[in-house]
Image: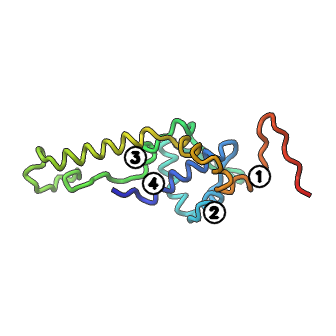
Amino acid sequence: MRLTKQTNYAVRMLMYCAANSDQLSRIPEIAKAYGVSELFLFKILQPLNKAGLVETVRGRNGGVRLGRPAEKITLFDVVKVTEDSFAMAECFEDDGDVECPLIDSCGLNSALRKALNAFFDVLSEYTIDDLVKARPQINFLLGIDDLQPRRVAGVPAAAPAA
């Protein structure tokens, strides 16, 4: 099984938004951070928005942010929105064109279904927050720190370099 680029970049977009949680993220900035086209990210944004995984804010100062907390968005949530099919073999397809006489009692079908369910179970264990926290330098790696100086509560802002 191989996940599509759409799923890969959907997860990356959500990670970016999670790392940049105190402000709106902009598609051009996300596209630059990952070296992908803005058009591709806009295409991915639609199903994520429809599923409530992100919210978009229109206008000159608009952007995108997570639709719910990063610790509440699992990888399974993203995969089920961005992948079209999980048919690992023709007997998984719902089109009714399967010619196999073993369709209802096949050991392969049963094994593949069990494997797919295990895959989904593992994806359900990981959140976007888990992925972001696993990379303490994620803001630096994505160039988020370069966008604007950030003020953390209780810590004075650094003086500008001379």
As measured in the structure, the alpha-carbon distance from the residue carrying label 2 to the one carrying label 3 is: 26 Å
Q: Amino acid at mark 2?
A: Lys
Q: Is residue 72 above or below residue 83?
A: above
Reading the chain from its start, which is encountered first: label 4 or label 2?
A: 4
Reading the chain from its start, which is encountered first: label 3 or label 1?
A: 3
Asked whether disc 2 touches disc 1, contact meaning CB atoms under 8 Å apart, the reply is no
Density class for disc 4 (Cα within 10 Å; few <14, some 14-19, many ≥20) is: some
Q: Which residue is mark 2?
A: 32
Expressed as whole percent of the image width and height from the top left, the position of residue 56 reads 60, 47
Left or right of 47? Residue 113 is left
Reading the chain from its start, which is encountered first: label 1 or label 4?
A: 4
As measured in the structure, the alpha-carbon distance from the residue carrying label 2 to the one carrying label 1 is: 16 Å
As measured in the structure, the alpha-carbon distance from the residue carrying label 1 to the one carrying label 4 is: 28 Å
Q: Which residue is mark 4?
A: 7
Q: Which residue is mark 1?
A: 148
Expressed as whole percent of the image width and height from the top left, the position of residue 130 reads 54, 41
Q: Residue at x 52, y 36 (%)?
A: 72
* Model colouring: rainbow
Density class for disc 2 (Cα within 10 Å; few <14, some 14-19, many ≥20) is: few
Disc 2 secondary structure class:
helix
Q: Which residue is mark 3?
A: 80
Q: Amino acid at mark 4?
A: Thr
Q: Residue at x 47, y 43 (%)?
A: 51
Left or right of 23? Residue 154 is right
Q: Amino acid at mark 1?
A: Gln
52 or 69, nearer to the observer: 69
